[in-house]
Image (cartoon, coloured by chain):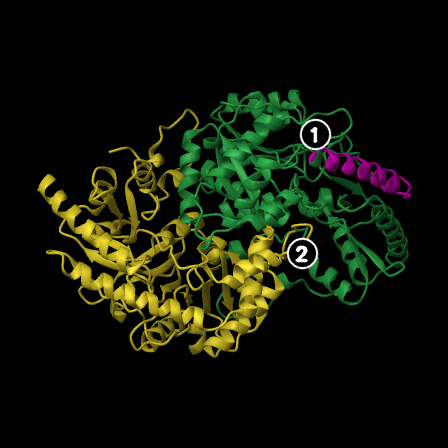
Chain colours: A yellow, B green
Amino acid sequence: MEKAVTEAPTTSIRISNRARLTPPSPIRKLAHLANRAKAAGTRVYHLNIGQPDIESPPEFLEGLRAFDQKVVAYEQSQGNEALRAAWSAYANRTLNLQTSPEQFLITVGASEALVFLFMTCCDPGDEIIIFDPTYANYLGFASIAGVTLVPVLSDMEHDFALPDRDRIERSITPRTRAILLCNPNNPTGTVYDRQDLEFLFGLCEEHNLFFVVDETYREFVYDDLQPLSMLHLAPQSDRVIVVDSLSKRFSLCGARVGSLITANQSVLAAVLKILQARLAAPTIEQFAAAYMLERIGDNYLENMRREFLSRRDTLYRAVKRIPGVAIHKPRGAFYTLVQLPVRDTDHFAAFLLDTFSHHGATTFIAPAAGFYMQNDRGTDKARIAYVIRSTEIEEAVTVLAAGLERYQQQYP
Amino acid sequence: MEKAVTEAPTTSIRISNRARLTPPSPIRKLAHLANRAKAAGTRVYHLNIGQPDIESPPEFLEGLRAFDQKVVAYEQSQGNEALRAAWSAYANRTLNLQTSPEQFLITVGASEALVFLFMTCCDPGDEIIIFDPTYANYLGFASIAGVTLVPVLSDMEHDFALPDRDRIERSITPRTRAILLCNPNNPTGTVYDRQDLEFLFGLCEEHNLFFVVDETYREFVYDDLQPLSMLHLAPQSDRVIVVDSLSKRFSLCGARVGSLITANQSVLAAVLKILQARLAAPTIEQFAAAYMLERIGDNYLENMRREFLSRRDTLYRAVKRIPGVAIHKPRGAFYTLVQLPVRDTDHFAAFLLDTFSHHGATTFIAPAAGFYMQNDRGTDKARIAYVIRSTEIEEAVTVLAAGLERYQQQYP
C-alpha cells in the first residue's frame, strides 16, 4: 500500500523531534487513500469523520449574505461582541443557564480553545488526566502545547463508564493540573450524568485541579436524556472551564467557531493574551454565527437530534448482524466504537480504501488505535461516525461486512 | 490610569507560568482605553494597528455571495485545493515565480503558519535569530511554541540595516535552528534587498539553519523598489520557508487567510500533521479567496501601493515638523518607528487615550518597547502604521504633537 504523505524522506536540514513525533490524525491520515479511491470512481462512505451531512441553518447562510462591511477588518481578539452576547443568550435560553457574554472567548473552533487552554493550565511537562479512549486530536493539541496526557482506561466491556476513584487518584501526580472530559464523549458516545460530573468535580476540588469539559456534543443525547452542562452544576467555579463549538450543533464544522466559557478571570485574561498574539478569529463566520444565533428557533436542533437518534438505531441494528463484531450502544454524540475480528484495524481500514470495493463502493472507518493512548487497546477497534443518512449507513455497513469477509479470506 | 485587563487578580487555582509570562500584545494591550475613549465620544485615530481602511476587493465579497454549499463542511487540512492552485498561479503570474500548488499550505493567517513553523523547526528551548526591533507577535508565537528568540539589534541610526556578519554569528549557538526575517519589515518599514537576502541565506547554509521569510508585505515597496521574494533567489532550497498572507495585500485582515510555501517535503509533511490536528482552516474565507485570486486584476494592488506611498510621504513630512521627534523613512510595508522626547512611550500612549483629547480627537500609537526584545531600546519609540487617509494622518499627527506638548508640561 502507498506510504502516507507523513512519511516523506528526510532532507539535509532536519525538522524538530516534536514535529516528527506528533501523531498523525487517525481520522485524516488515510484521506489520501480515500481521495484516490474516489478519483478511481469508487463511492466512499465516510464513517471516519464527524462531518454531518445535515444542511447548515439557513439563518447562517443568510448571515453570510447580510455581511456588508466594505473592509474585511480584524475582529476583536476576544471575539465579535454580538456573537458573545448571542451565544450567551442562546445558552441561557435553551439550557436555563446564567452565563454572561464576558465569560465567553471566541476561538477558531473548539480546537483552538483547547490548545490555548492547555497552555494556560499547564507549563511544559505538566499533566492532564484524560479517559482512554479519547478524542484523538487531544493528543495533537497536547503535543502542540508540550503537555503530557495521562490516560485512565475506560472499558468497552463496562460501556466506557468512568474508572473508579482509586484508579483515577493513582494517576494524579504533583504535576497534574487538570482533568479533561468530553461529554457526551467522542469517540465512544458515552454520556456522563450529573453524578459522574459531581464525582470528577469533587476530585478536582480535592486535588486543586482544573476541570475542563468539552461540551461540543452537549445537545446530542438520546433516549430519555437531557443536555447537561458543567455550567449547570458549578457555574461560578474558578476551576471549571467549558469548551464549546457550533460545529456539530449547527452542522457548521467548516465555520470553525468555538468558544471557551469560564468564570475564572485569570484564565480569561491569560487566554486573551494568547488570542491577541494571533490577532483575531475570522470575521465573517463570526458575523454570520451571531446573525444565526439571534434568530434560530429550537426546531433545528430538535430535528437534528431526532435524525441522529434514528441513525444510531440503524447503525446499531446493522452492525449487530455482522458475525464476530461487537458494538457499543452510544447514548450521545454521533460516534461509537466497534470491535472487529481483525488483528489491526489500521491495516484493515487501509485495505478497505486501497484494494477493496463492493458494487463500486467502500467504507471509510477510523482505526481506533489513534484514539487510545495505550494503542494496543485499540488495534481491534474502529470509531464509526453515524453522520450520513440511514439508508447510506445500511449500505456502508453492508460494504463493511463484505470487506471484513474478504479481508479474513485474504489475511486469515 | 486603569489597570489592563491582563492584570486580573489571581484566584485559588493558578494558571501556568508560561501563561502569566506571555507578553501582552503592544498593539492591542491599550485597546480597552481606546474603547473607553470612543464610548466617551472621542474620535480615535488608529495608528497602532496594521488595519488598513482600504476597501477589500469586490471580487472577494462576490466570492462570499457565490458560496452556495448547503453544508458548511470541513475544508481539507492542507487548505482548499482551488485556493492553493489560485495562489500559486497568482504568485507565478505577478512575481514571475515557478511555485506549484503542492508547495502551499493554507493557514489561519500568517500567525498560524508561524506558530506551526516554529514548532516544526524547533524543539522546546531551541533558538531562532531575529532582528530587533521585531514584529511583536513573534514573541507571542515563540512563547506559544516554547522557542527562544535571540535578538540581534538593528539601529535606527543606521536605518535598521542588517547587523554585520560578526554580530549575527556571535548569536548563533548549537541550539539555533533558523533565522527569521520579515521583509519588508514590520515594525520598521525597512526593505531588505537581494544582497541582504543572499547574505542571510549564505549564513543559513553555512550554519545549517532554516531561513524563514515573512513576506506579508512583499508588494508594499516604494520609490524605485520592486517586490522581491526569497523564492526568486532559492525556490528549491530545503532551508527556505516563505510565510505569506492575503491580509494586507488585499485588505483582508479579518479573513485570516495565510500560507506557508516551501519545497521542503519534510516540513510540508510535518506541518500537515499539525494542520490535521486542528482539522481545517475556515471554509468560507478560503472559498472567497480562491474566487478572488482567480479573477482579480493587477490594478487593485497598484492603486493600493500608490495610496500607501502618498500616505508615507504625508506622515513623514508631518512628523518631521514636530520638534524633538525623529522619524525613520520607511521604503516598504506601512509602518515606521518614531523616536519621541518622552521617557516611556507606554505611559505616553496610555496618556493620549486615557486623559487627553484635542478638539475631540486623540491618536492611538503602539509603544515600541513591545517590539524590542531589549525593551529599553524601545522606551522612547513608538510604531506608527500609516493605514488611514492622508488627511486623517495629518490630523492624527497634529493631535500627537499637541498631546506631546501637553504631556511634557504635565510630566516635565
Please rate how many residues cluster around mark 1, counting C-alpha atoms within 10 Å: few if below 14, some from 14 to 19, many from 20: many
Q: Would you name the residue on which mark 1 appears?
A: B191
Please name the predominant secondary structure of the magenta segment in the image. Answer: helix
Q: Quadrant of the C terminus of chain B?
A: bottom right
Among the two numbered marks 1 and 2 on one chain, the one whose residue lies closer to the N terminus: 2
Q: Would you name the residue on which mark 2 appears?
A: B29
Does residue B402 appear in the picture of this structure?
yes
Q: Amino acid at mark 1?
A: Val
Looking at the rendered image, the disc whose residue lies closer to the viewer, 1 or 2, is 1
Residue at 74 percent of width and 65 percent of height: B36
A275 lies above or below A332: above
Task: Out of B257 and A44, give the one closest to the viewer.
Answer: A44
Please provide percent x and percent y for residue B81.
Answer: 46, 38
Q: Amino acid at mark 2?
A: Lys
Residue at 50 percent of width and 51 percent of height: B68
Please provide percent x and percent y for residue A407.
Answer: 14, 43
SS of the residue under disc 2: loop
Q: What's the distance in space between the residues labelled 1 and 2, CA to CA?
A: 28 Å
Which range of residues does the magenta coloring cover? B301-325
SS of the residue under disc 1: loop
